[in-house]
Image (cartoon, grey):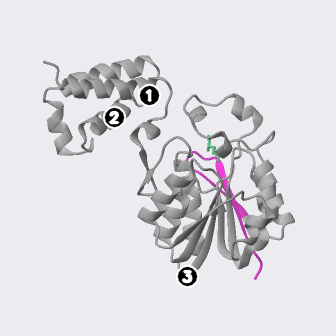
Amino acid sequence: MVTCRELLDDKIHLFTERGIENAAFELSELLGMVLGVDCRSAEYVQALGEEASDDVRQRLSELTARRISGEPLQYILGEWEFYGLPIKVGRGVLIPRQDTETLIDVIQGKLIGRNNLTAIDVCSGSGCIACAISNRLDCQKVYCVEKSDDAVPYLRENLSRHCADYEIIQADALLEETVNRLPDADLIVCNPPYLSMNDMEQLQTEVSFEPEMALYGGEDGLDFCRDFIRLWAHKLRPTGMMIVEIGIGQEEEVAMMMVQHGLVDIRWRKDMCGINRCVYGFARF
Ligand code: GLN
């Protein structure tokens, strides 16, 4: 007989050979999924000592094969945590990243205590940012602008689960007519596509499974950002805040774009790796 623990060890060995970092963590998550229990639970620990049925072996092999082909763990699991919330993910949406939690920290620090906020999340994707904001701040409503047909089902599901009052606007955020469909806001947040041509040529295999529309920002990575700031900066209410996620080394250029479009008190903030990860500014009083 083969126990679940032996099966697990065997697969960890396989993942390690294939160069997958955190093999033990990833395999525990996958085995937990197959067994239908949280891999941090006592039930799971107990199951490790029991026999692995043919069905369990078969299903785990299927999942490990997907992972070895490069598919991200998060897509296989179908859910990933962002700012303490379980967010549904899959092909068609960018996977929520810890880097992006930096934006929520900043937003929370600046806007906590303000009531009845109107927030706009542009390029919502899975909706992780919108859900975290709704969870942490007193929002009257969160508007989510998302263009992709593949993303909208995830967005809808996550918002319905975590967001008190929201509206999805499925449209191209870089069209004037889209901007005109929304009210003025206290907060406009965006995690735009910001990878450059050069970045795209060197994508990690896992990232190449994610939608190019959510990653590629043109030759220098800033095409989307330039148009976004030009079109949206004037939608802020007085003292309203705009915040955008950026890639390595983009802070000065993005800050200049905000200056050009009339924002003040512009700053950037580092993520947990020490990389400047977002730029934010405010509309005048
Ligand atoms: N942070 C992502 C990456 O490093 C890029 C996401 C984006 O362009 N918004 O792959």
Q: Which amino acid does label 3 sit on?
A: Asn
Q: What element carries label 1?
A: helix
Residue labelled 1 has its Cβ within 8 Å of some atom of ligand 1: no
Q: Which of 49 and 270 is in front in this view?
A: 49
Q: Upstream in the sequence, badge 1 or badge 2? A: 2
Q: Which amino acid does label 1 sit on?
A: Arg
> Residue 138, relative to residue 15: is it above or below?
below
Picture coordinates of residue 150 (x, y %)?
57, 47
**Does residue 164 appear to the left or right of 12 in the view shown?**
right
Q: Are marks 1 and 2 in contact (CB under 8 Å)?
A: yes
Q: Are marks 3 and 1 in contact (CB under 8 Å)?
A: no
Q: Is mark 2 on a helix, strand or loop?
A: helix
Q: Upstream in the sequence, badge 3 or badge 1? A: 1
The Cα atoms of the two marked residues, 3 and 2, are separated by 41 Å
Q: Residues within 10 Å of mark 1 (few under 14, many from 20)?
A: many
Identify the residue under disc 3.
116
- Write the start and end of the magenta stretch as one range: 267-285
Identify the residue under disc 1.
67
Picture coordinates of residue 247 (x, y %)?
69, 46
Q: What residue type is labelled 2?
A: Leu
Identify the residue under disc 2.
30
Name the residue at 69% across, 47% down: 193
Q: Nearer the viewer, residue 103 or 76?
A: 76
**For the N terminus, which image quadrant?**
top left
Asked whether residue 265 is in view, the answer is no
> Residue 91, relative to residue 227: is it above or below?
above
Name the residue at 13% across, 29% down: 50
Asked whether residue 55 is in view, the answer is yes
Q: Upstream in the sequence, badge 3 or badge 2? A: 2
Name the residue at 52% across, 49% down: 96
Residue 208 magenta: no
